[in-house]
Image: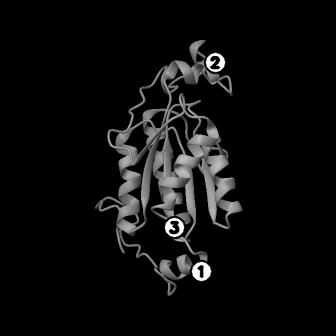
């Protein structure tokens, strides 16, 4: 596969994808599951990472290969050079989507937790997966902003309100909720374990 972006100005347009000799289906048979990405989007404090951590533990305890890819963690390494402007957020999500696609291609269930405030960026991640024939599920971890702000586990809302963080989603930058998420989790109504159980039930019908 050459020029996967379809962009004539892409500097990698002459690079050809090397598919190897081992198809994804062979790895999935070995694991007894389908690989795929569960993209969990929502404002800071909505519970994305907490729910994903519980779900990851449940899946691994069942003998499933699962990995939680957290947005904050990715910014410590691969995306450490990016800030929080609209342009940098788009690049942050583009890179994250590519990492998810590669991990899911191994047969893993990827639990991606990213605020990912812009619909177009989440749609681009879905498109990358669909092009590769890899399942992609957008999960909206919904929580009213005032509830998320009252939790403020990292003190970020307080800092943003005082002007200490520019472009903070929900305060200085808009969050665009999904219009047709594959699953909605209302964490203002559901306890963490209940939300994780609902997501696990969703995955049982689609990947495991």
Residue 162: x and y, percent?
60, 12
The residue singled out by tag 1 in the image is 30
Label 1 element class: helix
Residue positioned 43% across, 53% down in the render:
137
Q: Is residue 60 visible?
A: yes
Q: Nearer the viewer, mark 2 or mark 3?
A: 3
Estimate the spatial distance between the alpha carbons at disc 1 and disc 2, rounded to whole Å: 47 Å
User: Which quadrant does the N terminus fall into?
Assistant: bottom left
Label 2 element class: helix
Is the C-beta separation of discs 1 and 2 under 8 Å? no
Neighbor class of circle 2 (other Cα within 10 Å; few <14, some 14-19, many 20+) is: some
Residue positioned 58% across, 20% down in the render:
149
Closer to us: 15 or 187: 187
Mark number for residue 41? none
Q: Which is nearer the N-term, disc 3 or disc 1?
A: 1
The residue singled out by tag 2 in the image is 159
Q: Which is nearer the N-term, disc 1 or disc 2?
A: 1
Quadrant assignment, res 117: top left
The residue singled out by tag 3 in the image is 35
* Relative to 155, 186 lies left or right: left
When the figure is inspected, residue 15 is found, relative to residue 143, above or below; the finding is: below
Estimate the spatial distance between the alpha carbons at disc 3 and disc 1, rounded to whole Å: 11 Å
Estimate the spatial distance between the alpha carbons at disc 2 and disc 3, rounded to whole Å: 38 Å
Label 3 element class: loop
């Amino acid at each position: 596969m050459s020029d996967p972006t379809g962009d004539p100005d892409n500097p990698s347009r002459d690079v050809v994808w090397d598919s190897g000799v081992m198809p994804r289906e062979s790895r999935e048979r070995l694991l007894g599951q389908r690989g795929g990405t569960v993209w969990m989007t929502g404002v800071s404090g909505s519970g994305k990472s907490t729910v994903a951590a519980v779900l990851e533990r449940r899946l691994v305890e069942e003998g499933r290969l699962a990995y939680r890819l957290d947005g904050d963690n990715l910014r410590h390494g691969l995306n450490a050079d990016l800030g929080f402007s609209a342009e940098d957020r788009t690049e942050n999500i583009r890179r994250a989507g590519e990492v998810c696609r590669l991990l899911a291609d191994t047969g893993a269930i990827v639990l991606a937790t990213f605020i990912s405030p812009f619909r177009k960026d989440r749609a681009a991640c879905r498109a990358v997966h669909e092009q590769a024939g890899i399942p992609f599920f957008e999960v909206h971890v919904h929580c009213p902003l005032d509830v998320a702000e009252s939790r403020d586990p990292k003190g970020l809302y307080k800092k943003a309100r005082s002007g200490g963080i520019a472009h903070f989603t929900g305060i200085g930058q808009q969050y665009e909720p999904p219009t047709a998420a594959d699953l909605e989790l209302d964490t203002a109504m559901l306890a963490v374990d209940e939300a994780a159980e609902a997501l696990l039930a969703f995955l049982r019908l689609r990947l495991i």
